[in-house]
Amino acid sequence: MNKKSIAIIGTVGLPANYGGFETLTEYLTRYLSADFNLTVYCSSKSYSNRLSEYNGAKLVYLPLQANGIQSIFYDLRAIFNALSYADVLLILGVSGCIVLPFIKLISYKKIIVNIDGLEWKREKWNSLAKWFLKLSEKIAIHYVDVVITDNKIIQAYIRNEYNRESQLIAYGGDHVERLPLSTEVVNKFNFLQQPYAFSVCRIEPENNLHILLDALAQQNKLHLVIVGNWQANGYGKKLQSQYSNFAHIHLLEPIYDQGLLNQIRSNCVVYLHGHSAGGTNPSLVEAMFLGLPIFAYNVNYNKETTGHAAHYFSDSEELFGLLSYTTQKELNTIGSKMLHIAQERYQWQIIAKQYALLFDN
């Protein structure tokens, strides 16, 4: 029996070293390469060492950036290339979906799109970009064969906004590992010997780093460690400059070593999640799988992901109050609940099987 050919479009590429869609692709290829012929499109701009194959999947490199304005043309080029051989196109994100009305006129190939969060709502985009992303979302919903959403709140939005049902498939987190701090890591980051709160994210306004920093700057009970791309935009540069002189605040550059990142976040007193946009956020799911107590920004996406069992804040004053008055017993209880929910909902092998069913049907 011939295996179906699946093209995975819309990620930076493999090996995964960027974000959620890349990690999703990492585990789809790991679990599904034996059953499907998988091809993953990668940005040659992001890989100096370009592999021809990874996890049993073929890698195809395109000379464009996978993010920003170039992502539109990156996805379009991948879509047209995939039409020549793939049985199924899995498109991650909507930026390239503007072309789908034309594609459906010339091809009967099955197209599946994971719309991610509501990308057009993100504050980092100007009004033109927001208009384009909203249009791309609308076109994707109307012209693809299957829509995937990763959160019940996004699923309800698609149903209410477009009168269409979507397949709910979450994001996995069982690739993380709880690790003790090594002597080498403590020597490199000696502030980790003190109790600390932790967060890892892209430094963007909708992730509310200003709230986290303002709340933690007002107290001296905990150090604060945030890992992110501080120099990527004016928002990050301003915050880094504003808070660089606080002895108990440590703003680290991105860490791509999974083992090092696991050590640092595994041993925090509390995990802070400031995201206000998106669906099931990868870093939140990973923190849940580590059994960390979580204080999350008070939006429905985060409440749904954490099963309404974390603590939530809407501003720096509320976060300051949570940090000041939550007992260690309460923190332990939250951490245990997070791990239990993650083990029930967010395992990669189960998620890969859900994608496989969509590919086959």
Image (cartoon, helix red, strand yellow):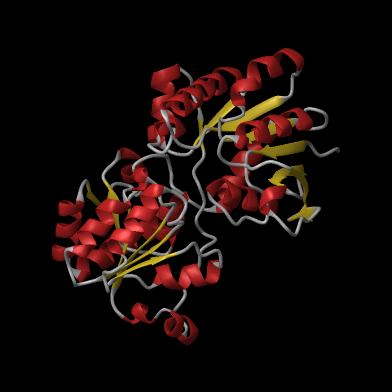
Query: Looking at the image, which is closer to me, 20 or 65?
Result: 65
**Vertical position of residue 254 compared to residue 232: above or below:** below
Q: Is residue 154 above or below residue 257?
A: above
Q: In this view, does 234 lie to the left or right of 17?
A: left
Please indicate whether residue 174 sits to the left or right of residue 152 in the image.
right
The quadrant of the image that shows the C terminus is top right
Query: Which corner quadrant of the image does residue 77 belong to?
Result: top right
Q: Furthest-right residue in view?
A: 1
Q: Is residue 310 visible?
A: no
Task: Return the residue found at the far top.
Answer: 105
Q: Where's residue 241, x and y in %?
A: 33, 60
- Relative image position of residue 128 (x, y in whole percent): 46, 25
56 above or below 108?
below
Is residue 124 or residue 283 the one in the foreground? 124
Residue 269 falls left or right of residue 26 = left
- Residue 198: x percent and y percent? 35, 64
Residue at position x 64%, y 53% in the image: 26
The structure residue drawn at horizontal position 30% and vertical position 71%, both measured from the top left corner, is 196
Give the side of residue 43 with respect to residue 172, left or right. right
The percent coordinates of residue 306 (x first, y second) are 34, 49
Q: In which quarter of the image is the N terminus?
A: top right
- Residue 135 vertical position relative to residue 94 in the rendered view, above or below: above
Residue 317 visible in the picture: yes
Q: How many labels does the image show?
A: 0
Q: Residue at coordinates 62% horizontally, 30% vertically from top-left?
A: 112
Q: Residue at x 52, y 53 (%)?
A: 347
